[in-house]
Amino acid sequence: MKPEIKKDSDGKLTLMIHEIREDHFLELPLKEYTLTFDDGLYRQYALWDHIKKIDTNKIFFISSGIINPVNKKQSKNFPTSREAHQKFFDFGVTEDFMNIEQIKFLSEQEQVSIGAHGYAHTNIKDITSFSKQIDFIKRDTEKLLEWFDKNMSFKPTEFCFPYNESNEIYIALLKGYGFKEFYEGWNRLDIGKISLF
């Protein structure tokens, strides 16, 4: 059975975006989709002047434990999402991610919402014990909600699973914390797979 792609209230299909290749991205018929940007990468913010011109809803999913401090420089090298995360996990480097001021700025823009992408951006498949998975999900979700409570003027209701890995228990636990919309790899179109024509 073919997976069903999530649609918004206007019937637009949902597009999954990690990296943005400027030469390709800006030529696509993006206003025909709801755009979801994973990982809170600085490149997404750096291209805001282009992205804001696309007349459609945009959701930026933020891992609230991977935020660049406001007083630290941000890299203009724009690595892939995988490379940016590896730099963070191996060395604690956050220069490839947005800072709180940039996230707040985006949250105030028209047609933009900020969703949650976990706190630590951990793949739950790497946690082998079922009870440890549950404990992790609870702690991680409570940390991300604590961050939103401290730093933002709203509580997120949209959740994108890190590494697009979920299960029924994860979803049920998140619903208990007030999340209502869930995004994964199977219910979004990958931007790399859509055509110009």
Image: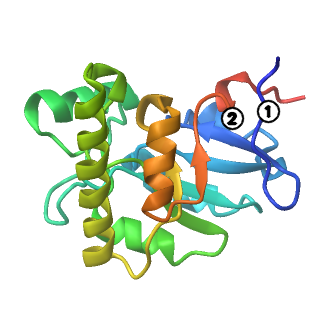
Which quarter of the rendered picture does the C terminus lie within?
top right
Q: Is mark 1 on a helix, strand or loop?
A: loop
Kindly check if marks 2 and 1 are in contact, taking CB atoms under 8 A apart as contact.
yes
- Horizontally, residue 31 falls left or right of residue 144, namely right
Residue 115 placed where, x, y %?
49, 58
Quarter of the view holding residue 89: top left
Q: In this view, does 69 lie above or below 86?
A: below
- Horizontally, residue 15 falls left or right of residue 2, namely left
Image point (45%, 56%), residue name: 45
Which residue is identified by label 1? 4
As shown in the figure, which amino acid type bears the numbered disc 2? Asn
Q: Is residue 127 above or below residue 5?
A: above
As shown in the figure, which amino acid type bears the numbered disc 1? Glu
Quarter of the view holding residue 170: top left
C-alpha distance separating marks 2 and 1: 6 Å
Which quarter of the rendered picture does the N terminus lie within?
top right
Residue 20 placed where, x, y %?
54, 37
- Horizontally, residue 25 falls left or right of residue 172, namely right
Which residue is identified by label 2? 187
Q: Is residue 10 above or below residue 37?
A: below
Image point (29%, 50%), residue name: 138
